[in-house]
Amino acid sequence: MKDVIAAALSSLCVVHCLALPILLAVGSSGLLLGLVSSEWFHYLMLLPISGLLVWSLPGGWCVHRNKTPFILGLSGFLLLVISLFAGHDAELPLSVSGGLLLAAAHLRNRVLLKRTQEILHAAH
């Protein structure tokens, strides 16, 4: 379940990254838009992202012993961190790529966990 939640949040991150420039271009203004477009919001979002990453992926590895979700998740997280310090032109592609990698990591982890459970269940 935690992988599903993490994948959904990663997908929302991608939507946020793609929709925000459109909303700014249209000229929407308001408190919510101001909050999600501010720099501190991106720093603040690293807390739940890193928490879900640490909570979910190492535990999955202990069950299925596949490094792919961890590599994808760490790569995605690093891209998000790098995007905070990258220039304006690189921020969007780095953030979107990072969010997609995080979603892929959690979905892959979920698939591997289910497959491992099915194999263990069939063995009994």
Image: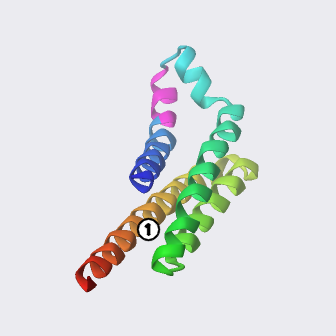
**Could you say which quadrant of the image residue 48 lies in?**
top right
Q: Residue furthest right?
A: 85
Is 79 situated left or right of 13 in this image? right
Find numbered disc 1 in the image and state the secondary structure of the residue it sits on.
helix
In front of the other: 27 or 122: 122
Residue range corresponding to the magenta coloring:
20-27
Q: Position of residue 22 (x, y in %)?
A: 45, 34
Is 1 situated left or right of 92 in this image? left
- The amino acid pointed to by label 1 is Asn
Q: Is residue 24 above or below residue 110?
A: above
Q: Position of residue 104 (x, y in %)?
A: 43, 64
- Residue drawn at x 26%, y 82% is 124
- Residue drawn at x 47%, y 47% is 14
Q: Residue furthest bottom?
A: 123
Q: Is residue 101 above or below residue 31?
A: below
In front of the other: 12 or 82: 12
Magenta highlight on residue 23: yes
In front of the other: 50 or 81: 50
Q: Is residue 117 above or below residue 18?
A: below
Secondary structure predominantly adopted by residues drawn in magenta: helix
Residue to which mark 1 is pinned: 109
Is 84 situated left or right of 21 in this image? right
